[in-house]
Amino acid sequence: SPGNFKSFASEIVRAYRGELSVALATVVNSPVGRPKLGSKLLIREDGTVQGSFDNSKLETETIAIGKTLAIHGGNRYFKTIDDTEIFVEGFTSPPTLVLIGGGHVNRAVSRLASLLGFRIYVVDDRLEFSNKERFPEAETIVISDYSRGLGKAPVNSNTYIVVATRGHRYDDLALAAAIRTPARYIGLLGSKRKTLEIYKNLLKGKAPPERLQEVHAPIGLDIGAITPEEIAVSIMAEIIMVRNGGNGTPMKMNIANLNTISY
């Protein structure tokens, strides 16, 4: 109906603004007449939908494809066993990475993230650590104190924040600002002891415990990283895991007895 199309358009515009991510599926050929030619299904990143194909099996298959395209963008065409043809298009903004702190680790994270297609924003209060020479990949560099600098970056549900400043006091300020945003991911660099100390301070300042529980701290996956570059791999691996809905476990097969395999 026209009302549905208007609602679809409204959500697609919001996706381009970075407020959400959606995919739109359209029936482009329907030899059996069901679903109707031109039927549309709006699929949100969380799997909720608007519209209907009047075919639950087809909707389930389409939703699975749509959720992936909502996150990553792009489009896909597929055909079912009865020759029904569906075109699915994703609408999203590029993922944004906000690096709070211009130290060695975030410098390495910036290089790696640029290869992975992230828009990069850097926030630091020191010009010598926050400049195009250190961060040539950054779209925007903000020289500001940590509590206010985050407000100059576009933070939405497709934003990932890495807090790695030069000390506890600054991490407190940066994390306090980060948890007030709708960012999809917030990570804090540092030891467990440092993390607990910062959480204690923030809880005293009435930070919402449920939002603090969503912070990835200490940041990254445990790969035994030591150098800034290795730590960057650990951090970006965790961010990709969160973005794609992975679980971070090794993909190695557990084969109990290789002797049972015939070759």
Image: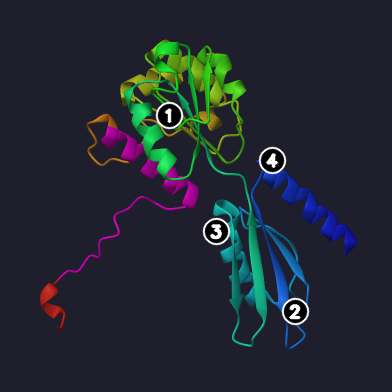
Q: For the residue carrying disc 1, how many other residues have a C-alpha within 10 Å: few (<14), some (14-19), or many (20+)?
A: some
Q: In the rendered structure, which disc, 3 or 4, sits on the residue that comes first in sequence?
A: 4
Residue type beneath disc 4: Arg
Measuring from the top left, give residue 162's x and y in whole percent.
44, 29
Q: In the rendered structure, which disc, 1 or 2, sits on the residue that comes first in sequence?
A: 2
Q: Is residue 240 magenta-colored?
A: yes
Residue type beneath disc 2: Pro
3D distance between C-alphas at marks 1 and 4: 25 Å
Give the camera-side residue of 42 and 90.
90
In the picture provided, is 246 more to the left or to the right than 260?
Answer: right
Of circles 3 and 4, the one toward us is 4
Q: Which mark is residue 136?
A: 1
Q: Which mark is residue 35?
A: 2
Q: Which mark is residue 60?
A: none
Magenta stretch?
229-256
| Residue 137 image-quadrant placement | top left
3D distance between C-alphas at marks 1 and 3: 30 Å
Q: For the residue carrying disc 4, how many other residues have a C-alpha within 10 Å: few (<14), some (14-19), or many (20+)?
A: some
Of circles 1 and 3, the one toward us is 1
Q: Quadrant of the C terminus?
A: bottom left
53, above or below 197, in the image: below
Q: Which mark is residue 68?
A: 3
**What is the secondary structure assignment of the residue under circle 3?**
helix
In the picture provided, is 120 more to the left or to the right than 260?
Answer: right
Q: Residue furthest left?
A: 259
Q: Residue furthest right?
A: 2
Residue at image location 74% in from the left, 88% down from the top: 32
Residue at image location 74% in from the left, 47% down from the top: 13
